[in-house]
Image (cartoon, helix red, strand yellow):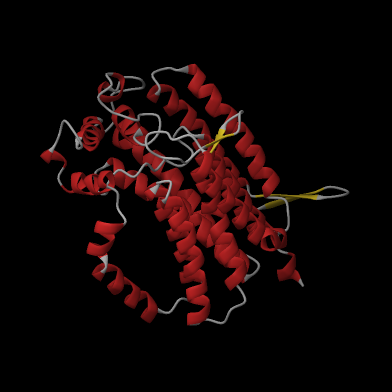
Amino acid sequence: MKQASFKRFTIFFDQYLFIAITLLSVMGLFFLYSASQGNINVVMKQSIFVGFGIFLMFILSQPDPDIYKILSRVFLITSLILVLITILVAKEINGAKRWLDLGVFTLQPSELVKIALPIYLAAYLFEKPIPIDLKNTFKSLLIIAVCFLLIARQPDLGTSLVVSMAGVYILFFAGLSWKFIGSSIIVFLISLPFLWNNFLQPFQQQRILTSLDPSADPFGSGWNITQSKIAIGSGGISGKGFEAGSQSHLDFLPETETDFIFAVIAEEFGFIGVCILLSIYMFIFLRCMYLAFNARDRFCRLTIGGLSLIFASTLFINLAMVTGLIPVVGMPLPFISKGGSSLLSFYIAFGIIISMASHKKLMQR
């Protein structure tokens, strides 16, 4: 952690996260070039988001964390309003209304909710006694439910689940009782048939059934998972080489630039390449956990912990999805997959993490 002091101001900076995230971003452009079959326009557009995102991460790491605490409610309300506007007026793409066309680029407001919700809950709960009482627990769960239902209405089951997880992480770190956690799990399991019949769309039910047995329809609903597994397995130890993946370059593997880019990486760079990539991810997560434990106050610890686990959860869901462990839910690989909104949301998250980790003035008083 470095603080470069000048005559009039101090720059707050964590060199470890900056270097690791920048390295991951550059690797992402390299992988995206192959996944897009050499489409330089796709790479250039992603490069603009990467450059702006790194700059944004630096800018957001400078304010005092109290600024984020004060603005947390405004941030969450604004994000939810944008989601609602998207549902009402956005153009439907592939059966979903998830993106707002801003002219220069399309914004996915649910990605902002993913950041805003844990910050708001951290600001709301950081002074509450441990364990938090039922009143504050149910208030928090109500806010989480509103966020979940709005995003699921688009529909976007993957992001709505991540948003819900983000809220639950903050509740857990804030001191949610184990008795309440156990009771909630039992209620959830009992209500699964009701949720299946009343909340899941037919295509979402089909995705779950396909993940259980892709071979039941290998040329239909099971095609994506089957081809992804073939691509990952065919990479072997060292891979087939850059731009030499048969599954991706012969168009067997779908969504190579977004959801299934990890399968492209595994096929072309093999087990060794995957281990290097996952090592960088692991370093970033462990660094964040270290920063959370050493943050200046409970609000910062809650926020860093929540945002870090969102990052880890997104990574896990993508890996589980492409390996067939869970249904395909449209979850990007952080800092690697094509997509401006998702990419910028992670830069925003890490900018806030660095801000909360590097400002230590309250600890020095």
In percent of the image, x 58 and y 51: which residue is there?
Answer: 81
Residue 15: give x, y in percent of width and height: 62, 46
Q: Nearer the viewer, residue 340 or 203?
A: 203
Q: Nearer the viewer, residue 137 or 227?
A: 137
Does 273 sit above or below residue 290?
Answer: above
Image quadrant in which the C terminus is located: bottom right
Foreground residue among 323 and 359: 323
Q: Which of the 4 image quadrants contains residue 50? A: top right
Residue 235 is left or right of residue 84, and the answer is left
Residue 131 shows in the view: no
Residue 139 visible: yes
Q: Residue furthest left?
A: 216
Q: Position of residue 56 (x, y in %)?
A: 65, 41
Q: Residue at x 38, y 78 (%)?
A: 180
Q: Position of residue 204 (x, y in %)?
A: 28, 47
Which quadrant would residue 213 be assigned to in this image?
A: top left
- On screen, residue 21 above or below 219: below
Q: Residue at x 32, y 27 (%)?
A: 268
As drawn, is 229 to the left or to the right of 34? left
Residue drawn at point x = 28 percent, y = 61 percent = 195
Q: Provide residue 149's location: percent of width, then percent of height.
A: 43, 57
